[in-house]
Image (cartoon, rainbow, N blue to C red):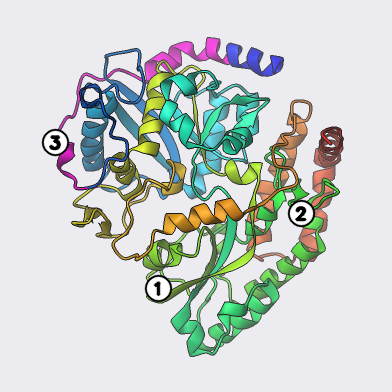
């Protein structure tokens, strides 16, 4: 960790003035607005000491009486159209609870990688930044995140107690915690999502399709009958195939150990024969027009789709996937095993800037979002009265699908109010999936990438150059994959692999 600490100190020294100017500014314009307590939603974090909560000190000691504004950067579908109204309402509640305001930046999916690189490389100040397995290790190595190990139990004790020990272990690097995992569907389960009415119209036995080759045959039948491209893809394409490989914390999709490989061999998943066969089927679907032709450049869609693949839980077909895609009879069929790994836990995390002036307030905000149902609903569902409303029994009715913040980036799912359209508590299914997940053979292992950061950066560039055309089927994988492998080798992939395998073997 000496290198990490030195880099963190250098970065903090160079950017201290910038951080104080743009990060965690106090704000005298309180934007109090009307009473935020009119909602009928439950407050899941009510304590016995009501006077302490009313003083804005319920979620930690705070260490300051000034009103603090925290910049929180997330990925999603861009800034909400009603952001200003939402901000006024939300900040009034946050000020009442913990004397904090937020300043949100919701970066569109297509711009996220570039925006994230700018943040990491330019020293731009923030307070809280969404991160995941693709960059977490490198962001820790470059020193942009604060070590939260000692602060967490004192400044966010309820949050610390809420997340199971194994999840903190998965989030830790060299026994230090640099980001808060969002405790939700932290295991990985993929689903084929169908418009059941359309599938049944063409006698497609969709409930028994569990491989890509059979999927291609079924979707060809639907295309012949309905026309158009039944399998809408965005530029990320079928990269869900990689979810069965533990990336070892290296943040390189073309490196990993398969979750069930007891020999723990570090490989390039693109060389897996099963992955190649699936890619060939994807390519054929693209050539046949089953996949939309603009897939390599397309963003995620909330419009109608006959079929798509998503990660989550089966109940989301009724609560999320169906409504977002205007599918009346939405069915989710499980594809593959449910797996838990460092990669899955790190799929959604939030780190605090190393030079943030008020880290205790940032932790209090994350704690509130993770433990207070009313605050959680604000971020998850949007503005009460415009995006959603509460029912008499404390459930939620969504008034539209216009809310563009991504709920999975913010905090746990287990304190989100249930939708009025669901009859069962879908979060119970999520917990059941988590509890029954198959642990990766590499669970708890974290590669030290300090000696191969240059090679990793070069290999990531190669992967990013081809990823969209590979996973959407726009190019023939039997030609493209060998080309990528040669470029990976030139970029230092074998050096990374050898170092990773050495560490994996030493950890036995």
Q: CA distance from mark 3 to mark 2?
A: 53 Å
Q: CA distance from mark 1 to mark 2?
A: 35 Å
Q: Secondary structure at mark 2?
A: loop
Residue displayed at 25% across by 22% down: 52
Residue 207 against residue 77 in the figure, above or below: below
The quadrant the N terminus occupies is top right
Q: Secondary structure at mark 3?
A: loop
Residue displayed at 61% across by 40% down: 133
Q: Secondary structure at mark 1?
A: loop
The 10 Å Cα crowd at callout 3, few under 14, some 14 to 19, many 20 or more, is few
Foreground residue among 207 and 463: 207
Q: Position of residue 172 (x, y in %)?
A: 62, 30
Q: Position of residue 114 (x, y in %)?
A: 55, 39
Residue 154 against residue 378 in the figure, above or below: above
Return the residue found at the far left: 34
Query: How many numbered marks appear?
Result: 3
Task: Give the number of the disc on residue 383.
Answer: none
Look at discs 1 and 2 and give the one toward the viewer: 2
Task: Give the number of the disc on residue 327.
Answer: 1
Marks 3 and 1 in Cβ contact (< 8 Å): no
Residues drawn in magenta: 11-40
Look at discs 3 and 2 and give the one toward the viewer: 2
Q: Position of residue 81 (x, y in %)?
A: 28, 48
Question: Which tag, 1 or 2, sits closer to the chain's start?
Answer: 2
Residue displayed at 75% across by 29% down: 448
Is residue 236 visible to us here?
no
Task: Give the number of the disc on residue 260.
Answer: 2
Disc 3 target residue:
35
194 lies left or right of 95: right
Look at discs 3 and 1 and give the one toward the viewer: 3
Q: CA distance from mark 3 to mark 1?
A: 37 Å
92 lies left or right of 301: left
């Amino acid at each position: 960790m000496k290198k990490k600490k030195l880099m963190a100190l250098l970065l903090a020294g160079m950017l201290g003035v910038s951080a104080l100017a743009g990060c965690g500014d106090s704000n005298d314009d309180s934007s109090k607005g009307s009473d935020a307590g009119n909602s009928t939603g439950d407050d899941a974090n009510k304590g016995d000491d009501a006077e302490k909560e009313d003083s804005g000190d319920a979620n930690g000691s705070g260490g300051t009486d000034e009103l603090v504004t925290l910049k929180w950067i997330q990925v999603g579908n861009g800034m909400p159209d009603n952001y200003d109204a939402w901000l006024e309402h939300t900040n009034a509640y946050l000020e009442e609870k913990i004397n904090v305001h937020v300043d949100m930046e919701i970066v569109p999916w297509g711009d996220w990688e570039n925006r994230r690189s700018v943040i990491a490389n330019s020293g731009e100040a923030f307070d809280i930044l969404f991160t995941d397995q693709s960059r977490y290790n490198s962001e820790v190595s470059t020193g942009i995140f604060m070590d939260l190990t000692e602060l967490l139990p004192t400044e966010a004790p309820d949050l610390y107690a809420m997340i199971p020990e194994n999840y903190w272990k998965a989030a830790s690097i060299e026994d230090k915690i640099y980001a808060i995992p969002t405790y939700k569907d932290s295991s990985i389960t993929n689903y084929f999502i169908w418009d059941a009415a359309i599938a049944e119209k063409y006698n497609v036995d969709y409930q028994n399709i569990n491989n890509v080759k059979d999927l291609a045959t079924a979707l060809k039948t639907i295309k012949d009958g309905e026309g158009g491209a039944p399998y809408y893809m965005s530029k990320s394409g079928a990269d869900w195939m990689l979810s069965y490989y533990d990336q070892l914390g290296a943040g390189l999709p073309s490196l990993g150990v398969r979750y069930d490989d007891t020999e723990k061999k570090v490989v390039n998943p693109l060389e897996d024969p099963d992955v190649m066969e699936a890619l060939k089927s994807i390519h054929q679907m693209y050539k046949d027009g089953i996949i939309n032709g603009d897939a390599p450049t397309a963003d995620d869609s909330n419009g109608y789709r006959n079929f798509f693949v998503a990660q989550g839980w089966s109940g989301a077909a009724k609560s999320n996937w169906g409504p977002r895609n205007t599918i009346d009879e939405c069915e989710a069929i499980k594809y593959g095993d449910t797996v838990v790994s460092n990669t899955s836990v790190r799929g959604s995390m939030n780190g605090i800037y190393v030079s943030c002036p008020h880290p205790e307030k940032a932790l209090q905000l994350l704690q509130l979002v993770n433990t207070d149902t009313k605050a959680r609903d604000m971020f998850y569902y949007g503005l009460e009265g415009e995006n959603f409303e509460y029912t008499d029994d404390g459930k939620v009715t969504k008034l539209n699908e216009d809310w563009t913040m991504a709920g999975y980036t913010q905090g746990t799912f287990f304190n989100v109010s249930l939708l009025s359209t669901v009859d069962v508590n879908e979060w119970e299914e999520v917990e059941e999936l988590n509890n029954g997940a198959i642990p990766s053979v590499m669970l708890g292992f974290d590669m030290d990438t300090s000696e191969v950061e240059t090679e990793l950066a070069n290999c990531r560039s190669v992967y990013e150059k081809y990823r969209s055309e590979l996973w959407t089927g726009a190019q023939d994988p039997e030609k493209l994959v060998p080309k990528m492998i040669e470029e990976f080798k030139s970029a230092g992939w074998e050096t990374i692999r050898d170092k990773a395998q050495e560490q994996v073997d030493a950890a036995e």
